[in-house]
Amino acid sequence: MDLCDGEPARYAPAGVRGRQAALAARLLGVQRLTLRLRDRLIRDTIAARLQVAALLRHYRPRWVFTTAGAGVHPDHQAAAAIVANGVFYALPKWDQVAGAAALRRSEPHVIERLFFGHCRMEPAWSRFDFAVDVSAVYERKLAALRAYESVFRGDQATLLDKYAAEDRYIGSLVGVRFAESFRARSPLLVASPEAFLPARFG
């Protein structure tokens, strides 16, 4: 789910970013859904929270992933808050609050986990809660990123190299070629220590 369409793009006319997003979705084999918030003007409002809550109630995911919102971009900070608060609004009883009539047509939903991914515009993390090995699908990830030609141009042309460097570094910490790091809102719980994959040096 995208909170906005990313327009206007820095290096392309209106409409191009949307076509690039559609191409990236096809390459990843996912369905893309875009809310109508305005790029560069995203704010954590009650209306935005309710939109996210309504989608969570409709699609009923087990896990929700969002940015940590620790960077300088105000949209990213707002996005993290909107998603976290939307998760809360999807819970029971919120449809009885004044102004939340849009939720009354849906059943409450409680997710299992809220995770935060590291955005490259945010400061580096000193620690993370877990990493996902993306080595087997890394070429597909790069192809999806390259679809955004309106982003990775000009003074941002080297961003893809920086993305790969971070994923390679995280991978080196956990003993794989490429990995992505995540933080969890709540302590992680496993049914058995056998759930953990082996790591270099224990």
Image (spheres, helix red, strand yellow):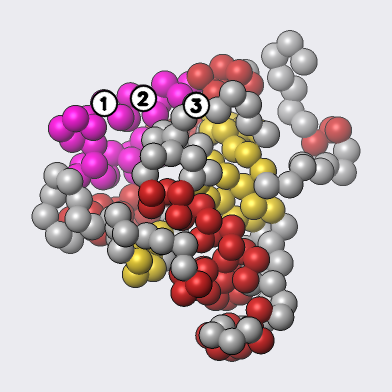
The local crowd at label 1, few if under 14, some if 14 to 19, many if 20 or more residues have their Cα within 10 Å, is few
Magenta residues, dominant SS class: helix
Q: Mark 1 points at which residue?
A: 158
Q: Which percent across, then down, holds residue 129?
A: 67, 34
Specify the amino acid type for callout 3: Ala
Q: Is residue 36 above or below residue 137?
A: below
Circles 1 and 2, Cβ within 8 Å, touching? The answer is yes
On the rendered image, what quadrant is the C terminus found in?
A: top right
**Labelled disc at residue 124:** 3
Percent across and percent down for residue 196 are 77, 31
Residue 162 belongs to magenta span: yes
- Residue 106 in the magenta stretch? The answer is no
Q: From the image, state whether disc 2 or disc 3 is nearer to you.
A: 3
Task: Give the amino acid type for the residue marked by disc 1 in the picture.
Answer: Thr
Magenta region:
140-168
Secondary structure under badge 3?
loop
Q: Where does label 2 land, which residue?
A: 162
Residue at mark 1 to residue at mark 2: CA–CA distance:
7 Å
Question: x%, y% of residue 117?
Answer: 53, 41
Q: Which residue is drawn at 33% across and 40% down?
A: 145
Q: Is residue 27 visible?
A: no
Task: Count residues near mark 3 (Cα–Cα under 10 Å), then give few for <14, some for 14-19, many for 20+.
Answer: few
- SS at badge 2: helix
Q: Which amino acid does label 2 sit on?
A: Lys
Provide the secondary structure element on which disc 1 rests. loop
> Which quadrant of the figure contains the N terminus?
bottom left
